[in-house]
Image: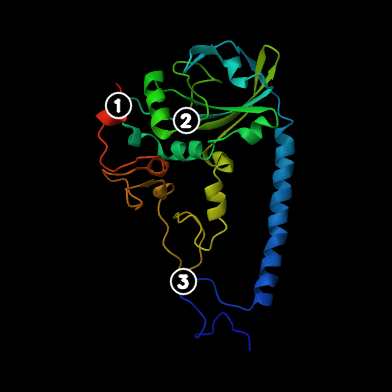
Amino acid sequence: MSPTPDDPTTALPGRPPVVDLATWQAARDELLVREKAYTHEGDAIAAARRRLPMVEFDGTVEVVGPDGPVPFLDLFQGRDELVVYKHMWYDGAPHQGQCEGCTTTAWHLKDAAYLNARGVSFAVLTTGRWEEVAAYVEFMGYTQPWYSVRDVAAPVGDPMGYLTCFLRDGDRAFLTYSTTGRGNERVNGSLGLLDMTPYGRGEAWEDNPEGRPEGRGPCWSWRSDADGNATWGPTSRPVPQWTRPGATPVETLGRQGHHH
């Protein structure tokens, strides 16, 4: 006899009901119909996105990178398309004090090889002073290009925390698309995988079945102490900072290349 969801010998409190494989497959197939509709709607939205108009701006505006000031057009690296992530920045903060959300997003974009293969370049822009930014990039071990856009007007500079797309036509530059908030999630593969798990992201806003682990505030798990405990305490920092070589919980501000 197949177990049923309310069978006390198989039910696990706070977890999905236990059923046989055929029952699970039927429920999975029912959900797949909705998932396919979601995928198709996403395709339709992407098609509409490709039909958005664009805004021309001065592509010679200068940004600051490891080689000093360069025109924004250089970020295309000779390609016609460019995606940038605009990383928030806290002036004068120690490395572990930088934005946990932006750090997480940038960490998921460490390699643009597959973008490059499709004629798309990638860069990270931030409003920090280049001296601080350079120290941070070295500390984190980032390999993608970073640039300071301090005091640069939109659409190159201005608000941070955005994914933004640009198009180049010779020496002309155009803004084509920009998104922020949950629009940035598309580059964070960890969130997509968490959405597939029975406990989800562990955030309070999620619609979870009764008895599942209680959720907390958005981004709560993106900062942790050295033991991996999610916390905003005095020894915490954005999670990706613990994965870099030689990370220790006792680094001082001076050893981190703290600049003012």
Query: Which residue lies under the disc numbered 1?
Result: 258
Vertical arrangement, residue 191 with respect to residue 140, above or below: below
Disc assigned to residue 44: none
Q: Nearer the viewer, residue 199 or 116?
A: 116
Q: Residue furthest bottom?
A: 1
Is label 2 in a helix, a strand or a loop? strand
Q: Nearer the viewer, residue 204 or 85?
A: 85
> In the rendered structure, which disc, 2 or 3, sits on the residue that comes first in sequence?
3
Left or right placement of residue 240 versus residue 36 in this view: left
Q: Nearer the viewer, mark 2 or mark 1?
A: 1
Query: Which residue lies under the disc numbered 2?
Result: 87
Q: Which residue lies at the image location 40% right of the left edge and 44% below the top edge? A: 239
Quadrant for residue 100, please give it.
top left
The answer to whether residue 20 shows anywhere in this view is yes
The answer to whether residue 89 shows anywhere in this view is no
Disc assigned to residue 14: 3
C-alpha gap between disc 2 and disc 1: 18 Å
